[in-house]
Amino acid sequence: MPTPRIALTPGEPAGIGPDLAVRIAQTAQRCELVVVADPAMLEQRARLLGLPLTLTPVDYDAEARVAPPGHLSIDTITCAAPCAPAVLDSANAPYVLQTLDRAVDLCRSGACAAMVTGPVHKAVINDAGIRFSGHTGYLAERCASDAPVMMLATDDGALRVALATVHIPLADVPAALTRDLLRHTLRVTARELQHRFGIARPRVLVAGLNPHAGEDGYLGREEIDIITPVIEAERASGLDLIGPLPADTLFTPHRLQGADAVVAMYHDQGLPVIKHLGFGRTVNISLGLPIVRTSVDHGTALDLAGGDHVDTGSLQAAITTAIRMTGVDHGA
Ligand SMILES: NC(=O)C1=CN([C@@H]2O[C@H](COP(=O)(O)OP(=O)(O)OC[C@H]3O[C@@H](n4cnc5c(N)ncnc54)[C@H](O)[C@@H]3O)[C@@H](O)[C@H]2O)C=CC1
Ligand SMILES: NCC(=O)COP(=O)(O)O
């Protein structure tokens, strides 16, 4: 396989994204990493960390090449305001989104094979007056794709969790959980596990929404009215689905045996489990986009920015997964 060129967006400049970029540059990669960011901001963070960093403008006309340690290719987008670790400034929100726009364009034009994103701070982007609930929805809009599916996966594939609903208030989940949404989530998850992960017939466990999967309707009706009918219909069309399963026992090793993924009904039903198992080596993957996008499993960790305790494990896993996905993609 030729060396892939991968766009890396460090995300919120006050967070640990710049630290991650500087630190990952110190280790050998199997791709050319093109950091889409402000070079002065990255150099400032490298100085603070006492790490070497040489940024070379990317040459998209040349073959992709692996950079030596301490080096990264750069595609320059400039911050609007000066930045310091842990000091959020909504003036830089447009900069953060511009880096994402650029990375999407690079992937769509074929200049990069995939994009890997560092963490953004959702609130500071909203503070700037820009409605933003996360990369997944934003990137889908940029790619004109509807209803992407967020899936987190440990780097060894031991657990994969896709979400039916994502960044909405918990109180809004039941109304958002429609038959159409669940059908779409199951189909996209199964299809992408086939095309992007090479799993011929993925087995997917589907969680219920209510305690004990509704206890025959005595603890909630979503299982009877929404989840079971969709599972039965999709099973009849060939998907390998098991559920609705009570979420409290779905994640036991016995249940997970032979399963390729879990579809959870909401963010905090699925993500605490996978983060408990593999925080720091888990990858966030956007399914249903025309481009490959992976991301870290953590947020901006303002408390650690510019310090010595930033773990690059999840970023490394996101890069490795992106490379693997670009090799496995048979045209999803
Ligand atoms: N991919 C993304 O863009 C994500 C963005 N976020 C955003 O990040 C912001 C902060 O979110 P929080 O809930 O506080 O989660 P967080 O992941 O930033 O922090 C949670 C805890 O994990 C630690 N931590 C996080 N990353 C670490 C790393 N690489 N190495 C060592 N320790 C690490 C932090 O110090 C903190 O104790 C929010 O605005 C949230 O929306 C959260 C998750 C993903
Ligand atoms: N909880 C996952 C998260 O916040 C990252 O979401 P996204 O930015 O990848 O959409």
Image (spheres, rainbow, N blue to C red):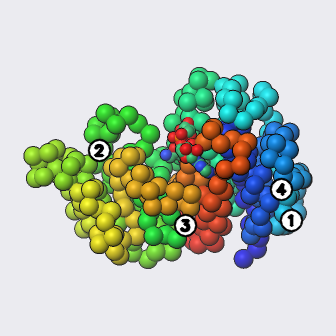
| Mark 1 Cβ inside 8 Å of ligand 1 | no
Residue 214 is situated, as x and y percent measured from the top left of the image, at 16, 50
> What residue would you read off at disc 3?
155
Front of the two marks 3 and 2: 3
State which quadrant residue 84 falls in.
Answer: top right
**Spatial separation of the CA atoms under disc 1 and disc 3:** 25 Å
Q: Residue at x 72, y 54 (%)?
A: 7
Name the residue nearer the viewer: 269 or 46. 46
Front of the two marks 2 and 1: 1
> What residue would you read off at disc 1?
68
Q: Are marks 2 and 4 in contact (CB under 8 Å)?
A: no
- How many numbered marks are there? 4
> What residue would you read off at disc 4?
72
State which quadrant residue 328 falls in.
Answer: bottom right
Q: Amino acid at mark 4?
A: Leu
User: Ligand 1 appears in which quadrant?
Assistant: top right
Q: Earlier in the sequence, mark 2 or mark 4?
A: 4
**From what the image shows, is residue 89 above or below residue 322?**
above
Crowding at mark 1 (Cα within 10 Å: few <14, some 14-19, many 20+)? some
Q: Earlier in the sequence, mark 2 or mark 1?
A: 1
**From what the image shows, is residue 23 above or below residue 200?**
above
